[in-house]
Amino acid sequence: MSPRSLVLLAPLLLFAACATEPDPVEPPDIVEPDTVETPVGIADGISADEAVAVLNPTEGNTTSGRVTFTAVEGGVRVVAEMRGLGEGPHGLHIHETGDCSAPDGSSAGGHFAPDGSPHGAPNDPAGQRHAGDLGNIEGDDDGAGRYERIDTVLQMSGPASIIGRGVIVHAGQDDYTSQPTGDAGNRIACGVIVAADES
Ligand code: CU
Ligand code: ZN
């Protein structure tokens, strides 16, 4: 047998030897969770490209729905879909604490304002509005409302991340000027922003 044919044969012999061995046990795949629960009050620095808040009615109210936050080019797309809202404009804000345990929603604290800015309108630039000032969501005559805009102030990562914060819908309209909350009235629905992915 020539040295060349030995070389060609070697992989075959190796294969035959291996074929009699039991298959090696593969290590289990690491399964990534679909959602990451954000502990209440430990929000700082948690990041995500997509997050959602499910809003439930506060005591004595019937408003519920969902707000999604998606990182996009130039900002964060915010989409809110609510029902049981009542006709007309209702203040919609991110509040500083992701805690809806109080019957009146007061546990969510004040407007999320990591830079200490005054209350303002959603189209005001950073420094002239709270990060959490999303403005108003308009209820139609069936009490349903949809809100969509791309916000350029909200952050989904870093120390000013909105992950783990609260979302509040109010009984009345945010007037964009009254301090510190826009005089939007009672809190009729509350939810906590949780990451919908990992990044
Ligand atoms: Cu509010
Ligand atoms: Zn505000």
Image (cartoon, rainbow, N blue to C red):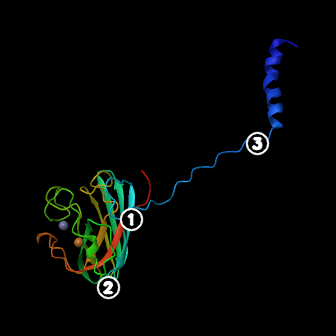
Task: Identify the element where label 3 is drawn.
Answer: loop
Between label 1 and label 3, give the one nearer the viewer: 3
Q: Give the quadrant of residue 66.
A: bottom left
Which callout, 1 or 3, points at the residue further toward the start of the chain? 3
Residue appearing at x 82%, y 31% in the figure: 17
Please give left or right for residue 8 compared with residue 40 in the image.
right
Residue appearing at x 23%, y 56% in the figure: 153
Q: Give the quadrant of residue 46.
A: bottom left
Tell me which amino acid carries mark 2. Asn
Q: Give the quadrant of residue 133.
A: bottom left
Q: Position of residue 144 (x, y in %)?
A: 34, 80
Which callout, 2 or 1, points at the residue further toward the start of the chain? 1
Task: Identify the element where label 2 is drawn.
Answer: loop
What number is the disc on residue 52?
A: 1
Which callout, 3 or 2, points at the residue further toward the start of the chain? 3
Mark 2 within 8 Å of ligand 1, using the beta carbon: no
Tell me which amino acid carries mark 3. Asp
